[in-house]
Image (cartoon, coloured by chain):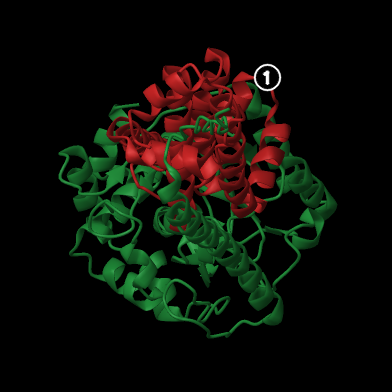
């Protein structure tokens, strides 16, 4: 009798999509990608933690000098000297005229925006008011304060202004502070611990200038307290001018056209300007995330305003012209600056 | 007959090997970057002003592209329900859009503030939300990247499980003879 040999039946092999020979390589790729992702995440979080730690390590100071452009607080809170103040207070009217004409004929390389949102002015002590709500950490507030100061200098005088910066994450642009910040690092997780900078050293026979700047840690990012917290800070001053101004700003929130949509948030006489009226970070609009203004000192900026010859300076003067136009309309053109032809032409557009 | 378990890595590798799905991944990433870019410049007067580390942005875009390709793969191969595939694709689009609204200076949240106001949120609440986003901006972007990675992990697992259950003939057809 023949021996039946067992028949070996082979099991059907599964057909993976990729095939066995790729598994080892895939594993290596996966591990590398995972490590890469973890490194990126940890580095990003670590950078944030390092910035917070560094910020907590530095104390208050009016003359701290640290870091390079983009992460510097050199000279923060130091008052402008007399010659620097003169650049703001005594700017030549012809500069405003030239810049205004450039704005009207479209030869500015930077964006300057003339928007019209008419409201009833806030009047206190018989004068219309310029109201400012911003943050010392804010990049657009930082850039726009130069134009604001130039504009306000046409209607009055700053007895004091201070060197400042926007926050590091907001490109650390050199700017002016309205009041001596006595800048200190603080706990940005606690809105109430930061405070609000209220007031300035400006006087004018034509207008009131009411300024409210949210405080925050310059070594971190943009920060501003919620409006209700700001209101509490304003009310705590007991100052009727500022309390009335805050109530006036809150009354504007009922309309989308005039509501708060970010900083700076300003009212110039009878015109609300939601946001900056210009974006001027260099001689032209940046195409990337490198802002030339970040790499300038306060002295360099003021030197350009003193003898304007580049698009940066002309654009800032033009931005000031926009604000001047709003104020002139509110004060019936009683100030000398209102007689400039460029201002008259801009006013005619209202 | 016991099917070999397909790994998530195998699924992702299949996407990378396929010119079509790799193209979807790359094109999706580019489109998402354009969405992100345009949201940023629309809020910043035409300036691409990003206030978070740029590598977080790139990680967000890349992971969203992978998720989109994964969703497209699952739909085209019918390995998952159309709803599941579309969900992955939609998720991949939502997060870069959210990133475009928060990855810039909170001082210029005009789009976000307008959206919130349109939703009936008053100015006080809008300012509070904006303040909060400004405070936790870096964490929000990191969370977006993490969410994308979690969704990639989840969907690749679903696809791998679904693929396991196929009969060998259909699986061979999907593999295109790549065994």
Quickly name the residue at label 1: B120
- In the rendered structure, the residue with mark 1 lies on which chain? B
Locate the N terminus of chain B and report the quarter of the image it occupies.
top right
Where residue B110 sits: x, y (%)? 51, 34
Kindly identify the residue that appears in the image at 56 percent across and 46 percent down.
B145
Q: Is residue A67 visible?
A: yes
Kindly identify the residue that appears in the image at 41 percent across and 60 percent down.
A146
Q: Quick one: B2 or A214, which is closer to the camera? A: B2
Where residue A96 sits: x, y (%)? 27, 53
Kindly identify the residue that appears in the image at 52 percent across and 21 percent down.
B85
Where residue B178 sits: x, y (%)? 34, 36
Kindly identify the residue that appears in the image at 26 percent across and 49 percent down.
A110
Where residue B174 sits: x, y (%)? 40, 25
Q: Quadrant of residue A1?
A: top right
- What tint does the image give chain A? green
Q: Can residue A145 be seen in this view?
A: no
Left or right of A166? Residue A193 is right
């Amino acid at each position: 009798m023949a021996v039946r040999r067992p028949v070996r039946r082979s099991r059907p092999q599964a057909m993976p999509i990729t095939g066995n020979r790729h598994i080892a390589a895939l594993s290596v790729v996966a591990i590398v990608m995972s490590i890469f992702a973890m490194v990126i995440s940890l580095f990003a979080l670590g950078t944030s933690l390092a910035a917070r730690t560094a910020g907590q390590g530095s104390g208050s100071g009016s003359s701290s000098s640290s870091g390079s452009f983009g992460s510097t607080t050199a000279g923060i809170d130091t008052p402008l000297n007399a010659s620097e103040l003169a650049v703001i207070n005594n700017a030549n009217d012809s500069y405003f005229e030239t810049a205004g004409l450039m704005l009207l004929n479209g030869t500015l390389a930077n964006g300057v925006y003339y928007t019209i949102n008419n409201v009833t002015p806030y009047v206190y002590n018989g004068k219309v008011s310029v109201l400012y709500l911003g943050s010392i950490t804010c990049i657009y507030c930082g850039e726009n304060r130069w134009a604001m100061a130039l504009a306000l200098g046409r209607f009055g005088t700053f007895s004091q202004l201070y060197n400042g910066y926007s926050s590091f994450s907001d490109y650390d642009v050199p700017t002016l502070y309205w009041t001596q910040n006595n800048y200190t690092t603080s706990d940005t997780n606690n809105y109430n611990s930061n405070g609000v900078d209220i007031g300035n050293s400006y006087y004018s026979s034509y207008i009131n200038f009411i300024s409210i700047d949210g405080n925050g840690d310059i070594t971190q990012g943009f920060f501003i307290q919620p409006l209700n917290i700001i209101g509490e800070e304003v009310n705590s001053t007991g100052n009727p001018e500022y309390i009335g101004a805050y109530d006036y700003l809150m009354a504007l929130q009922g309309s989308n056209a005039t509501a708060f949509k970010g900083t700076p948030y300003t009212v110039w006489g009878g015109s609300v300007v939601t946001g900056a009226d210009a974006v001027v970070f260099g001689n032209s609009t940046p195409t990337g995330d490198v802002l030339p203004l970040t790499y300038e000192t306060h002295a360099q900026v003021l030197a350009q305003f003193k003898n304007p010859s580049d698009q940066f300076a002309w654009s800032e003067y033009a931005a000031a012209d926009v604000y001047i136009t709003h104020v002139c309309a509110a004060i019936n053109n009683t100030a000398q600056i209102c007689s400039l032809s460029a201002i008259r032409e801009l006013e005619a557009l209202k | 007959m016991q099917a070999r378990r397909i790994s998530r890595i195998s699924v992702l590798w299949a996407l990378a090997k396929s010119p079509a799905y790799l193209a979807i991944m790359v094109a999706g990433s580019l489109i998402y970057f354009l969405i992100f870019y345009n949201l940023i410049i629309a809020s910043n007067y035409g300036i691409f002003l990003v206030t978070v580390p740029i590598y977080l942005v790139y990680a967000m875009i890349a992971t969203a592209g992978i998720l989109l390709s994964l969703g497209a793969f699952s739909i085209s191969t019918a390995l998952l329900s159309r709803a599941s595939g579309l969900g992955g694709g939609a998720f991949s689009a939502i997060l870069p859009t959210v990133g475009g609204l928060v990855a810039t200076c909170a001082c210029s949240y005009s789009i976000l503030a307008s959206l919130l106001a349109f939703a009936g949120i008053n100015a006080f609440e809008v300012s509070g939300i904006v303040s909060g986003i400004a405070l936790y901006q870096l964490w929000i972007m990191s969370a977006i990247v993490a969410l994308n990675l979690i969704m990639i992990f989840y969907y690749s697992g679903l696809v791998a499980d679904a693929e396991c259950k196929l009969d060998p003939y259909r699986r061979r057809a999907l593999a295109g003879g790549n065994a």
